[in-house]
Structure formats: C-alpha cells, structure tokens
Image (cartoon, rainbow, N blue to C red):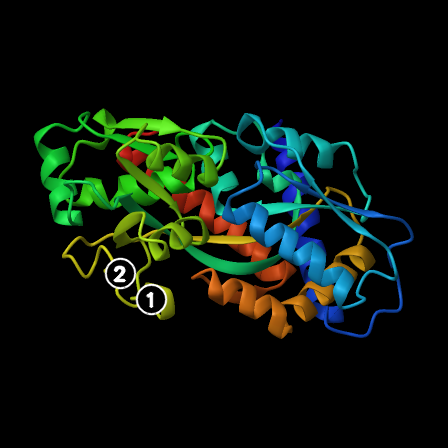
Amino acid sequence: MTNAFNRRRFLGQSAALGALACTGLAQAQTGWRPSEMVRYVIGVAPGGSVDLYARGIAQALQDLNLVNGQTVLADNRPGAAGLLALQQLQRQRGNGHYLGTFHTGSIAGQVTGMLKADMREFVPVAMMVEETSLVAVREDSDIRSAEDLVARLKKDPASLRIAVAPVRGLNTHLAIAKPLQAAGVAVDRLTVAPFRSSGDSMTALLGGHVEVVSATVPTVIPHQQAGRVRILASADPRRGTGVLAGVPTWRDLGVPADYVSYNGVLLPAAVDADQIRFWEDALRRVSQSPAWQSLVTKSGNRPVFQGYVDSHRYLQSELQQTQSLVSQLKLG
C-alpha cells in the first residue's frame, strides 16, 4: 500500500469514529437490519476458544431474536493463520451479513508476518471476551511446577516440545514466550510445535507427542478437571477465580510478565455507519445476556464489552505494543 492510501484510510476511519461517537451507537435501531442469512466466518478449526465464543455469539444472536429473524451460520475456515477466513471477508466489502473473528492473535500474526493481511483493512465492531492462556503438562509429567519448567528450559531450551496454535508467533506462543524470556530462558531456541487449534494441542499433549502446552483457558480446564493435566501458570496479570482460583500467575511466581488477549467480532471493510450501529447494539445485548456471561465465566475467562470506537483504538494500540514485544522476543 502507498503512504497516500494509508493516510486516506486513516482519515476516513477517524472521520467514521467521530461520526459514530457523536450519533451514539446505543440508540434504537431504525436503519439497516439483516435481510438474509448471516455468515459468521471463524478463522480456526473447531475445538478452541475462538471457535467456542464465535459459536456462542452466533447462537445468542438467534436465541435473543437480534437478527431480524435470520439464521446465523457458523462457518469454520481454518488455514494460513486465519488468512482464509479474512479473504472471505475481503470478498464481501460493504456486506453487513458477514461477521468474522476479531482476536489479539490475528494482530500478533500480522506483526510477526505469519498472517499475510492487514487487520486495519477490516472493521472491529466489538470485543466480547478478555482471555488468558495457561501453561500445562500431563498429570504424570515429572515437571511439577512452573519453576521446574523454567529450570529445565534454562538448562536446555530445546529439550521440551511446546504446543501452540495455530502457528508460531500468535497469542498462545507469545503468552508463554514472554514470561519464559523474563525468567531467563533463551526463547529463540525453544522447540515450538504448532497445531491447527488449541484442541489439537491438547490432544497432542495427552497423546505424549509434546511435553508442554500453551493454550487458552476453555481448552485446558476440562482436562484439568478430569485429572489429565496439571496447570503450571496463568498469563493473566490477576489471580483468577472459580476454576482458576488455585492457579498461580507468572507474577505470583516472581516473573514480571503477563499476556491478555481479547476476542470479539469483525466486519468487512466498507460497511456503513448503520451496519456498524446495528451490530454494535446487537452484540452489546448479547454481552448482557445471562447465558452468554455464564458461557464465558464457566470457561474461565471474563465477559466484557467494548464497542466499535474502543475496539478500533485497541487494534491500533495493540499493533504498536505487539511490534515492540515481538522485537524483544526476536520472533519477527
């Protein structure tokens, strides 16, 4: 892209931000509404937290009668670090009947070059979940604690296979690399094994194909509750509650590092203010529903709501912060 194009795009987005903020996105909807099936394009394989939350949102939109009587189809398009799903959205410019997954991992993928797309070309309309990643091993592992893990990797960084998803350089990779580096591990020498989803990562761990996994909370917790895995640490800056109450954070263990991701909804480029307004209001109502809040809370993460303006600002700031982190970790 040329600099002139980037300037025009930034000015256009800034104007849209100002206009939407002034009109008030929470007003009653009198403009655009879905008039055909809504397709929710999910950029990962089934089984991980991104898929869980996207399907939860799709179901809630229907159950709460928020889509003008239309069906919301969850459509998994895994591959190329999420690029296949984004390409689907790119072909639907201006079409508010398409939703996509907005996730911190996509921003990380752009920065590291794993995702061959520019997230600024899309429209983040809402952030719905604040999530963290956990480091876990099999219950029968001789690695009993995060301290054991750090000691082993300091001695030989390549000695343990660490599962992440869906590729190196995305959020589950950064969530373990950042604290390990802070603890003194040579993270550029780690043996990192990428899998299509965190669900696949867990399967590999349980099957003995890897020794360590970094995965999102909803994927790990069921196996921990079944006694199959041991959670070593959480990348959350705060000690969790409920199912995570007994899990130490890296900061609890004296390692000054954390990594929090956000999960939400993306729209294609060139959607208009009425379409953005409709989806922001619908997703706000989803975020307030007891069923949605229960789904997120039971999965071990936190339900949140940040609308279009805040989501857009987060995208811009996270791109800058992730660039700094990736440079520090020598992952780019």
Q: Quadrant of residue 281?
A: bottom right
* Point 24% across, 28% down: residue: 190
Q: Is residue 256 above or below residue 92?
A: below
Q: Is residue 326 above or below residue 146?
A: above
Residue 89 in the image, given as x and y percentages of width and height? 72, 37
Residue kind at label 1, given as amino acid type: Gly
Image quadrant where one finds the N terminus: top right
Residue 94 in the image, given as x and y percentages of width and height? 81, 43
Residue located farthest toward the right when viewing the structure as drawn = 35
Image quadrant where one finds the C terminus: top left
Disc 2: CA contacts within 10 A as few (<14), some (14-19) or many (>=20): some
Q: Nearer the viewer, residue 314 or 80?
A: 80
Q: Earlier in the sequence, mark 1 or mark 2?
A: 1
Residue 332 seen in the current view: no
Residue 315 in the image, given as x and y percentages of width and height? 53, 49
Q: Are marks 1 and 2 in contact (CB under 8 Å)?
A: yes
* Point 68% across, 63% down: residue: 283
What residue is pinned by disc 1? 240
Determine whether, in the image, residue 2 is placed left or right of residue 58. left
Residue kind at label 2, given as amino acid type: Val
Q: Quadrant of residue 186?
A: top left
Element assignment for label 2: loop
What residue is pinned by disc 2? 247
Determine whether, in the image, residue 210 is placed left or right of residue 320. left
Residue 146 seen in the current view: yes
Q: Is residue 104 above or below residue 19?
A: above
Element assignment for label 1: loop
Determine whether, in the image, residue 332 is placed left or right of residue 121. left
The image's mark for residue 309 is none
